[in-house]
Amino acid sequence: MTVLTPPPPATAPPAAPAAPPAAGPGTAVPGAPPARPGLALTGAALCVLAAVLLGFVANLTLVGHLQHSRDQQTAYDELRRQLALGIAPVGVRTYDDQPLAPGSPVALLRIPALGLREVVGEGTTSGVLMSGPGHRRDTPLPGQAGTSVIMGRQWGYGSPFHALDRLPVGARIEVTTGQTKAVYAVTGVRRPGDPLPVRTTPGKGGLTLITATGGPYTPSGVLRVDAELTTPVQPAPPRPPAGWIAPDEEALAGEKGAWLPVLLWSQALLAAALLTAWALRRRGTWQTWVAAVPVLGALGLALAGALTRLLPNLL
C-alpha cells in the first residue's frame, strides 16, 4: 500500500535588500571618504596658484604678444581714419577740445633699420604700454619744437623696443602725426651713468626713445636713444609745463591704480577654485575639470594681466 506524503509548504523568496537612500546635494555618499575642509582649501589654493602662474607666463609671452598685435591693428585703423579726416590729435586735446584719453593713437613710428612699425599711444602707464609704445604726455608731439619722449617695452607685449640699443648713429626714425611726417637722425645711445646730451636748441626739435636695460623680464635701468629733427619744425598748441604727469607714467614705474582689478579678479578666481574643489568631491573628476579648466584659465589670465600692470612699465 502506497503512502502519500504532503508536499512541503511553499516558502516566499528572500526579500531584496533595501536600496540606499539617494544622496542629495548636502548628503555624503556612503563609503566616500569623510569631508576634510582643510584639504578642500588646500586644493583651492593650489588651483589659484596654478592659474595665476600659468596666466602670468602666458601674459608676458604668447597671449601678451597676441594682445599687442590686436591692439596695434585696432589703433592703426583708428589713426588712419583720423588722418584721412584731418582730426588726428596735435596736442593734449582732441579736435573738438576734449582731453585726449590715455592710450589714444597719436603717431605712427617707423624705424627702418629695425624693421619696426608701431602706433604710438598717448601716455606711458604700464597699461598703455601693453598695447605699444607710448608718448610721454608732458612733452611735445614728434615734429614740434622741443624734445618729444616715447617709451616702449623691452620684452613683454610685443617687445617693440627690444633691439633699440643696436641703433647706429645716423639711423633714420620716421614719425607720422596729424601735422607732418617728422624725420629724425639718431645722435647717440645712452645707458645708466652716461653723460647727458646737449640740450635741444630753442626752436629746434628732438626725440628720445626710452626702454629698459637688463636681462629678460628683469629690468635694471633705463636705456635712451637720442635723435635730432631733420625736417621743418611744426607749430605746437599750448601744453602744460613739464613734470605734471602722474608718478605712474615715469620710466620703470608700476600702475598703482591696478590694485582694485587685482583684488576683484582674485576674489573671482578664489570663488571658482573653491567651487571646483567642492565639485571634485560631489561630481565626477573629468566632468569637473572639463567645466573648470576654461573658467580657471580665463580668470587666471585676467588676474595676471592686472598684476602685470603693477610691474615696471618698460618690462
Image (tube, grey):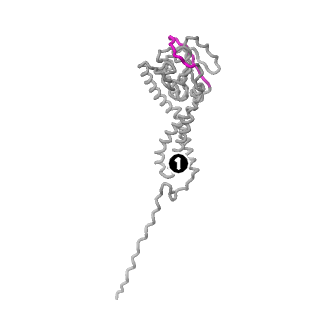
Q: Where does the image place residue 40, in percent across and percent down from the top left?
A: 56, 49
User: In which quadrant will I find the C terminus?
Assistant: top right
Q: Residue at x 63, y 21 (%)?
A: 192
Q: Is residue 118 visible?
A: no
Q: Where does the image place residue 224, in percent across and percent down from the top left?
A: 58, 20
Residue lying at the far front of the rendered structure: 97
Assess whether residue 259 is covered by the magenta stretch: no
Residue highlighted by disc 1: 277
Between 207 and 50, the residue placed more toward the observer is: 207
Q: Secondary structure at mark 1?
A: helix
Give left or right: position of 30 versus 213: left
Against 302, residue 291 (above or below) is: below
Q: Is residue 210 visible?
A: yes
Q: Residue at x 47, y 28 (%)?
A: 71
Q: Where does the image place residue 256, in percent across and percent down from the top left?
A: 58, 32
Between 225 and 108, the residue placed more toward the observer is: 108
Against 13, residue 36 (above or below) is: above
Tally of numbered tags? 1
Q: Kindly identify the amino acid type of the residue bearing the numbered disc 1.
A: Ala
Give left or right: position of 148 versus 95: right
Against 215, residue 264 (above or below) is: below
- Residue extent of the magenta highlight: 221-240
Q: Where does the image place residue 262, in percent across and percent down from the top left?
A: 55, 37
